[in-house]
Amino acid sequence: MFESFEFETLTPQLASVWFGLLIGVAFGALGLLTRFCFRRAVVGENRRAALGIWLIALAVAVAGTQVAVALGLINFSAHRFMVSDLPLLAIITGGVLFGIGMVLTRGCVSRLTVLAGSGNLRAALVVVVFAIVAHATLKGVLAPLRVAIGGFTVNLGDTVSLAALPGGALLWAGIIVVVSLFVALRSGNKPLVLIGGVLIGMLVPLAWVGTGYILFDDFDPIAMESLSFTSPTAESLFFTLASSAIPAGFGTGLVGGVVFGALVTAVLTGRFAWQSFENPSQTGHYLSGAALMGIGGVLAGGCTVGAGLAGIPTLSIAAILALISIAAGGLIADAVMRASAEFDAPASRPVLQPAE
């Protein structure tokens, strides 16, 4: 469709950068205002409210994405989420590692990218380390590990998506939407917060349609993408370091937009504040968690947003398995940390939790 606009200088790739920037600004602002975070929904202090925000975003994302599929605007048949040889071991291992990492850093990478824009230096360092380790797992010294673990696959045949199961896409998408809305509307969140979750969810199909239909050009094709932070964060870091050799794309614009959107929103709402590490132990937890998320995000095929919020609306079995594995890793890590803290802490002293 892009060629119908008859731009003389704007290419699909350059247009995707600006489009990613706009999507990112919206996500950064909304993410900061709603405290959107999958970790909070799984092991947070007020997980009921956090889960409500996350699930209402998921419901809107699923509904919007499947409407776009039904209208023929986008098609996921050739997407990486739909490969018949499911890298089962990589997805489960990566998901668990990512879940452990997000507990150690007190935030998944999307949340930490938002927090980095609000002046949180802990989050900023985690994002940088995450990007380095993710890139090393994709193309560097850890790539052989990725290839070895990814070699263990299970052939799903044609059943790579819930759409292939009895009832088809309409039934399974409907179940996800109805259940998610039921939980979200009973979460105790204020209507304005839930509206913020709705707007976050709308960004997912908007990005899919934008990159997969509006910016599609037979002569200069770009990848169909939506919200994601694993590969885009790594790409953004190395674009910053070597922009003359590494071109920017949708993901680069997205990450930059998230930081900018969160920064502007934090300044305008009085939420901007410099924050740093409190002690060496906390620093070690955060850096370890960043490395685990970097490896895990690549192995699992995405983070809580890339495989979860944007992946599940494709109805991909791989994306669903990845999110379940991330949640499992988070629950395991939280249980271990709580047990360790209770064992080590003096009886007369309350257990202190690291600041988010």
Image: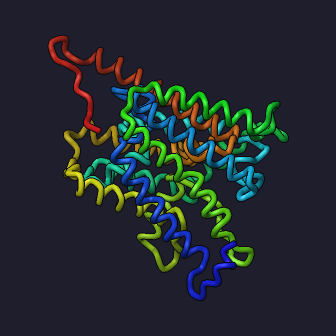
Q: Residue furthest front?
A: 191
Compared to 13, does 93 lie above or below? above
Q: Residue furthest right?
A: 157
| Nearer the observer, 28 or 354 | 28
Q: Residue at x 66, y 49 (%)?
A: 147
Q: Quadrant of the N terminus?
A: bottom right
Q: Residue at x 51, y 57 (%)?
A: 135
Indicate left or right for 201 with 217 as reference.
left
Q: Residue at x 36, y 42 (%)?
A: 34
Q: Residue furthest bottom?
A: 8
To which quarter of the image does residue 60 belong?
top right
Residue 47 at least partly seen: no
Residue 41 at least partly seen: yes
The percent position of residue 317, horizontal first and vertical second, equals 70, 37
Compared to 157, does 179 lie above or below? above
Q: Quadrant of the C terminus?
A: top left
